[in-house]
Amino acid sequence: MKDTTIPWAVTGQSPFSSDSGSAGVMARVADFTTRVIGPRPLACRAEPPAGTPKERNGGPAAQGPSTLGFAPGNLGMIPSSDVARTPRSGRTLARFLEPLDSSAGSAHLVRQSGLLFDSDGESHELPRYQFTGPRGGGDAVRIGIFATVHGDEPESGLGLLRFLQELVQRPDAAEGFVINAYPMCNPTGYLGATRHARSGKDLNREFWRDSREPEVRLLEAELRRHQFHGIVSLHCDDTSHGLYGFLSGRNSGAVLSASLLEPALRAAEEFLPRNCDSRIDGFHARGGVLSTCYDGVLRAPDDVRPPPFEITFETPQHAAAVRQVEAFNAALLTILAEFRYLQAIGQNI
């Protein structure tokens, strides 16, 4: 991407405001969702209670464009189950990444060489981006963000692209951070519109288990090489009626992870309701926070010191795709802001 001068954000401006300079960018993301996200069966579960939660998922109360921070006509109100799916034969990685690669270049954002692997005689790429925020007062904080580990959850990848676009417009939001972003961790699953990779494996059950899956091996090497201070995985759950998040289940780093997840959920509730069930995805939950998770999920190796914070953030996949994209963006921006705040408190103790 070519180097360009990035204007500073207006003082006091909300990162979720339509005045943030990202309205046109988000309109392009909203338009793009009509080409990469399409119909999928809904989970067999009861409808959410009548009222605010259902309305915030695209009902009558959600018709105003101000809720989303941009005005793309009615695109923001289209539920993902009603959007025309791109035929499998028409899916390409370049098309998926178009919202970011076609936006203005930035001196802060670099598309790095992709991680290459072969599957059934075909070459595939795990794309990588690095956003370097303005220099802060100390050493840079390294954050790794991963999306579309399940190929049928492209909303998570679009949410990560949206977040990077926001940072291009407002680089100060990432002051002191170096963010490594992996928006498409399962390209063969995406191309086939399947949860699993082409091998038939669920990649998010394969990490740190001596897996032979090339995608897992490449991502494990990235996790070891970068020694991230924080790891965020983005997912979409078609069995959930609201937002929720997993902690890693490890005691080390759990307090920091929980301190970041709760504000992230609150910020994302601007766009989608929270799932406050006592059990979610088979795990005990409290206020949308799950303290344990599955074995083999994407996370840091056990020997990383100091242990990073680790969060898996989930949106309800049956909700409007654009609302999921905005919820991911709001959550990620809040995680950066809260981490910086907690870091400042720690330095003053």
Image: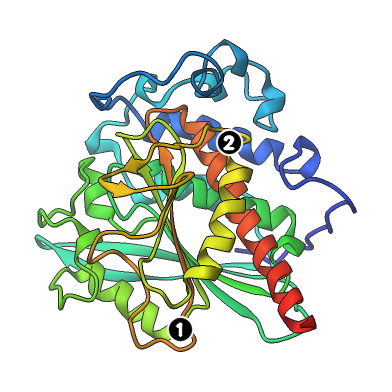
Front residue (pair 321, 34): 321
Of badges 2 and 1, the one in the foreground is 1
On residue 207, the disc is none
Residue 231 image offset from top left, x and y in percent: 46, 68
Residue 16 lies left or right of residue 290; in this view the side is: right
Residue 201 image offset from top left, x and y in percent: 13, 57
Tell me the crowding category of disc 2: few under 14, some 14 to 19, or many 20 or more residues within 10 angstroms, Cα based: some
Residue 102 in view here: no
Which residue occupies 51% across, 52% down?
160
Residue 47 lies left or right of residue 151; in this view the side is: right
Which residue occupies 46% across, 45% down?
288
Residue 39 in view here: yes
Q: Mark 1 points at which residue?
A: 227
Q: Helix, strand or loop at disc 1?
A: loop
Q: How many labels does the image show?
A: 2
Q: Helix, strand or loop at disc 2?
A: helix
Image quarter in which the C terminus is found = bottom right
Q: What amino acid is labelled 2 in the image?
A: Arg
* As drawn, 236 above or below 227: above
* As drawn, 59 above or below 113: above
Q: Name the residue under label 2.
A: 28
Measure the alpha-carbon separation of dots 2 and 1: 34 Å
Image quarter in which the N terminus is found = bottom right
Tell me the crowding category of disc 1: few under 14, some 14 to 19, or many 20 or more residues within 10 angstroms, Cα based: some
User: Of marks 2 and 1, which one's residue comes earlier in the chain?
Assistant: 2
Front residue (pair 312, 104): 312
Which residue occupies 68% across, 57% down?
168
Q: What amino acid is labelled 1 in the image?
A: Gln
Residue 48 image offset from top left, x and y in percent: 41, 21
* As drawn, 152 above or below 112: above
Q: How is the image coloured?
A: rainbow
Which residue occupies 40% across, 31% down?
35
